[in-house]
Amino acid sequence: GAVVSQHPSRVICKSGTSVKIECRSLDFQATTMFWYRQFPKKSLMLMATSNEGSKATYEQGVEKDKFLINHASLTLSTLTVTSAHPEDSSFYICSARGEGGSEQFFGPGTRLTVL
Amino acid sequence: SQQGEEDPQALSIQEGENATMNCSYKTSINNLQWYRQNSGRGLVHLILIRSNEREKHSGRLRVTLDTSKKSSSLLITASRAADTASYFCATAIDTGRRALTFGSGTRLQVQP
């Protein structure tokens, strides 16, 4: 199957700093990428959908100024958590879907811990 | 709000036994997918069943879909300790964006 990578896999930062998480499709062109958030022992919650070259669509309750998403190319989307707070600590997972595809391929996730 | 609810939330069985997990959803779907997640890891796609299908098999996995009841089940036969993981069902919430909405998940523990 198609491969999606995320970087970093784990990050610890201080309150108030910004953290950038990268999501890459390694062997296919991802026209759409999705960002999910997962709290411990909970399910995945969709945060936003990004299409290459256009603005991301955020889910209700997700602050677009706090979670900046950039889908600058067909293989890369980035999520920047701005002015991070301890409550932003979570597991962030991206997924990517190719043109016309129905299956999403998930990245391995990024564990963010904000001190 | 969550589209899917799964039961049981947690399931503990012995190796060799079968494990059945159920998922219910609320809206019309194009397809339903099952994923597996090992602790602290990403998701692995297991199987996709389309709305016009009723049953699908893949190795030791058997998935059923009842669109009239808006429910699906995942059966893992002859379970192994390596099957220990969380299992999620996911549905596409619309055809345009095809984002997935995940169920609450079932944590499966297979005792060796």
Image: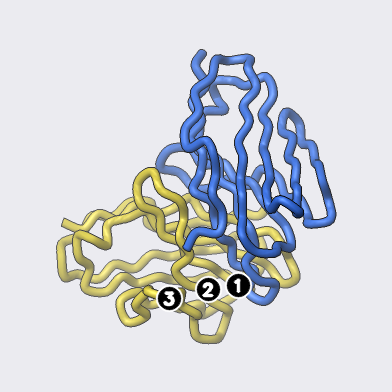
In the rendered structure, the residue with mark 3 lies on which chain? A
Colour mode? Answer: by chain
Chain B as rendered: colour: blue
State which quadrant residue B14 falls in: top right
Identify the element where label 3 is drawn: loop
The label on residue A49 is 2
Say which of marks 1 and 3 sits in front: 3
Q: Are marks 1 and 3 on the same chain?
A: yes
The answer for which chain carries disc 2 is A
Q: Which chain is yellow?
A: A
Q: Judge the density around disc 3: few (<14), some (14-19), many (≥20) Cα neighbours within 10 Å.
A: few
Residue drawn at the location 60% of the way across and 48% of the way down: B89
Amino acid bearing label 3:
Gln
Q: Mark 2: which amino acid?
A: Thr
Mark 1 against mark 2, which lies toward the viewer? 2
Question: Of helix, strand and loop, which one carries label 2?
Answer: strand
| Amino acid of disc 1 | Thr
- Most foreground residue, A17 or B27: B27
Q: CA distance from mark 1 to mark 2?
A: 7 Å
- Decide which of B77, A108 is in the foreground and name it: B77
Tell me which label, 1 or 3, sits earlier in the chain: 1
Q: Which residue is mark 3?
A: A60
**Subunit of label 1:** A
Task: Measure the C-alpha gap from mark 2 to mark 3.
Answer: 12 Å
Could you say where residue A75 lies in the image, as x and y percent from the top left?
57, 69
